[in-house]
Image (tube, helix red, strand yellow):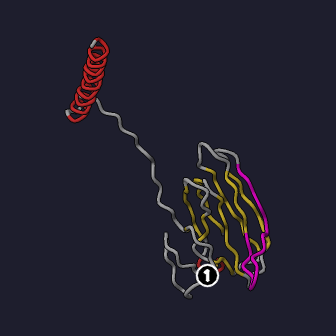
Amino acid sequence: MSKIITKLSSLALATAVIGSGFSVNASAAEALDSNEFKNEVVYETQENVGVNDVEPGLGEPNVIVPFGTSKPTSTWDLSTQGRYPFSGSANSAVSLYTNYLLTGKSSVKIYVRNNDHQYSLKFKVKRKDLVFDNTIGSYELALGKDTTINLSFDKSSNYYIEFSGPNNFSGHIE
């Protein structure tokens, strides 16, 4: 009989502990609902400008779909259209690419700033060829740093920039 009383006492104690836990949680939820306590996480978002997550060079000609899955084939002629601005950020290992294939100049200046507070920025300048894309240069920028790169291009070829993720950057090519 004493074993049964011990088990019932243990069960009653467990029920009381669990019951009080639920009432504490309910009180905390009520406090949050009544705005007595407010924990809020704010994330800075940045709209990607001139870049997306799809490598250029395939797809329907003259169609640009920012943030989409269509691979743009449109070109940006630096000699007639001028400076091409870009900025973007990706919180994962997704690479971002310029929206256009860049063409029209034999000498270009690329300015890039790493706006990230956590990661170095890795990027490549690539030439779009028929079968394989060739890397013209690979670069890495430390946190908060910027650089200007002068490159020689074949003005009749098409080029683009690939930014490895995670990243947060801005710049232009002219």
Given the current orientation, which residue lies at the most extreme bottom position?
A: 61
The disc labelled 1 sits on which kind of residue? Thr
SS label for mark 1: strand
Location of residue 40 with respect to 28 vertically, above or below? below
x%, y% of residue 127?
A: 74, 76
Left or right of 121, for residue 135: right
Name the residue: 62% across, 64% down: 172
Name the residue: 78% across, 80% down: 154
x%, y% of residue 18?
A: 29, 26
> Alpha-carbon neighbours of circle 1 within 10 Å: few (<14), some, or many (≥20)?
some
Quarter holding the C terminus is: bottom right
Which residue position is annotated with label 1? 75
Residue 36 drawn in magenta: no
x%, y% of residue 153?
A: 77, 75
Residue 105 or 131: which is nearer the viewer?
Answer: 131
* Range of magenta residues: 126-141
